[in-house]
Image (cartoon, rainbow, N blue to C red):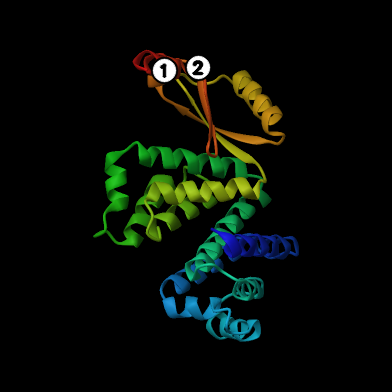
Amino acid sequence: MQGASRSALAHVRSELGRRLSEGADAADTSRELFAAVDVLDGNAGLRRALTDSTHDASSRAGLVDTVFGGKVGDPVLALLREVSSQRWTKDRDASDAVEELAVASAFAAADRRGRIDEVEEQLFRFERTVAGSADLRDAFMDRQRAGADKASLVHALLDGKAEPETAFLAARGAEHPRGRRYERVLEDYLRVAASVRQQLTAIVTVATPLTPEQRDRLARALHNLYGREVMTNVVIDPEVVGGVRVQVGDEVIDGTILSRLENVRRDMAG
């Protein structure tokens, strides 16, 4: 998001935190916000009306009450009023923001139950599984396959093997990708998870699995480097030969043997 939308998103994220801290049920909030996303995505005229700054905030809030009143609880209704009160660069940004609030609420529900680490790890592993399987990628990319069928596939793969929030988010993303590749949906969800935890996430690529001691040392090193906790998601890739490649956001710290060999080749070619 750019400009005004970025500020608006920060505001509504803060409002979500306040509502949850006041006792709103995080799981219910997530489900109701996702339902609101579906309504907004299905009605471009409604999106434009709710984000049209030429109309005063009270009339936009009244429209929220008319459309969503009685269909969602008071905390979500208040959040949707806040969304309508903000200035958005594009009307689509508002529905994107509501989706982010829904995802954040799902992770907050997991956090309240002491399992946000497991949910984040499981969602990351599932994204890697999909990315590494041509059959699964094709299944989730199939435009002729109903969204509900894709969600059923997720449940068949995850129910009983993952936390409820993991299955809920993975199924939601499969059924309603909102124009994105499925892997990108899960990546976006994981980005929200990091913000809920107020931490960075590092994707660590190594040739062989790290020992618990190595993971602890890496976590401490990243904490010292960035000044805050960094969640590490480890990917095993024998092709890197040795060493470690760490990606935090757009920053890459690459110390693999393959990287050094490629650097030598580039130097020789130059």
In the rendered image, the quadrant that contains the C terminus is top left
Q: Identify which residue, 53 or 34, lies in the foreground.
A: 53
Q: Which residue is mark 2?
A: 243
Tell me the SS state at disc 1: helix
The answer to whether 147 appears left or right of 194 in the picture is: left
The label shown at residue 65 is none
* Residue at the (44%, 20%) spot, across then down: 259
The answer to whether 203 appears left or right of 265 in the picture is: right
* Residue at the (63%, 48%) spot, across then down: 195
* Residue at the (55%, 39%) spot, across then down: 249
Residue 249 higher or lower than 259, as above or below = below
Q: Earlier in the sequence, mark 2 or mark 1?
A: 2
Residue 149 picture location, percent across and down: 32, 58
Q: Identify which residue, 9 or 43, lies in the foreground.
A: 9
* Residue at the (46%, 38%) spot, across then down: 125
* Mark 2 touches mark 1? (CB < 8 Å): yes
Q: Which residue is mark 1?
A: 258
User: Tag 2: residue type?
Assistant: Gly
Residue 31 appears in the rendering: no
Residue 8 picture location, percent across and down: 63, 65
Residue 107 appears in the rendering: yes
Tell me the SS state at disc 2: loop
